[in-house]
Every structure is written in C-alpha cells, then in structure tokens.
Image (cartoon, rainbow, N blue to C red):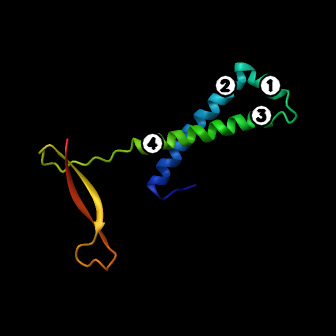
Amino acid sequence: MHLKSPMLRFLFGHGVIGGGAGIAIAVSLLAFDVAGLASLSMKSEPTWLGPFLLCFSFFASFSALAMGAAVMSFGGEGNDGDDDGTIVRHRIVPGTQNPDSGHAERAVIRVRK
C-alpha cells in the first residue's frame, strides 16, 4: 500500500505503532493472567470473543492515542530569521484584491515570545 499524502503516511505510521503497542499490552495481560482475565475469558462460550474484544479495544485506543499525540506534537512555530524576539504565525484571510473572487491569502501575524 502506497500513501501519497505525507499527512496520511504520518498518521498511518503512528497509528500502526500505537496499535502494535496496544496489542502487545493486551496479549501480555492475557499471557500473565492479570486479574484473572485469561481464565475468565476461557470460561465464556465462544472462547475467542473475550481476547479478541480486549485486543481490538486496546488496538483502537492506543492507535488513536498515538495519532493524537503525534498531531499535537507536530511542530508549527515558524521563525522569520530576523531575531527580533517574535514568532511568525500565519492566518488565512479573505483576499484583499477582489473580495468576490473567493481566493484566500496568508497574513503575517507577529507574536512576542
């Protein structure tokens, strides 16, 4: 599978890492029979359903956690290089040339550190 979008590759990679960690933790909980999880799940009627639900929920939770943490830690503060102690942030504003054109441009906003 080849993802062309760099953001999708970024999210997919972190999701796979988080999901793998979640499955590893769920399997280790079952292998060491923490709080009797493995013995309790073996007493259920379809014996595969309990461990599957545990592993799937850990996979989904940990992959979402990893993707969320990756997005929140994604760098975004720019520096314009003039060393005046300000950080440059951009905000999309409507076009100033022709307001009816629907085009947007970037406006520079300086913020003190």
Query: Helix or strand or loop: what does disc 3 sit on?
Result: helix
Of marks 2 and 1, the one in the foreground? 1
Q: Position of residue 18 (x, y in %)?
A: 55, 38
Q: Nearer the viewer, mark 3 or mark 2?
A: 3
Q: Marks 1 and 3: in contact by CB < 8 Å?
A: yes
* Coordinates of residue 12 in the picture (x, y in percent): 53, 48
Q: Nearer the viewer, residue 48 or 107?
A: 107
Q: Amino acid at mark 4?
A: Ala
In contact (CB < 8 Å): disc 2 and disc 1: no
Question: Which numbered mark, 1 or 4, is in the foreground of this view?
Answer: 1
SS category of the residue bearing label 2: helix
- Which of the pair 71/1 is nearer the observer? 71
Q: Is residue 106 above or below residue 85?
A: below
Q: Is residue 76 above or below residue 57?
A: below
Q: How dense is the environment of label 2, judged by Cα within 10 Å: few (below 14), some, or many (20 and up)?
A: few
Residue occupied by mark 1: 40
Return the residue at label 4.
70
Residue 101 location in percent, x, y?
Answer: 32, 79
- Could you tell whether 34 is left or right of 103 in the image? right
Q: Which residue is mark 2?
A: 28
Task: Please name the residue that numbered disc 3 is placed on.
Answer: 50
Q: Quadrant of the N terminus?
A: bottom right
Label 3 close to label 2 by CB (< 8 Å): no
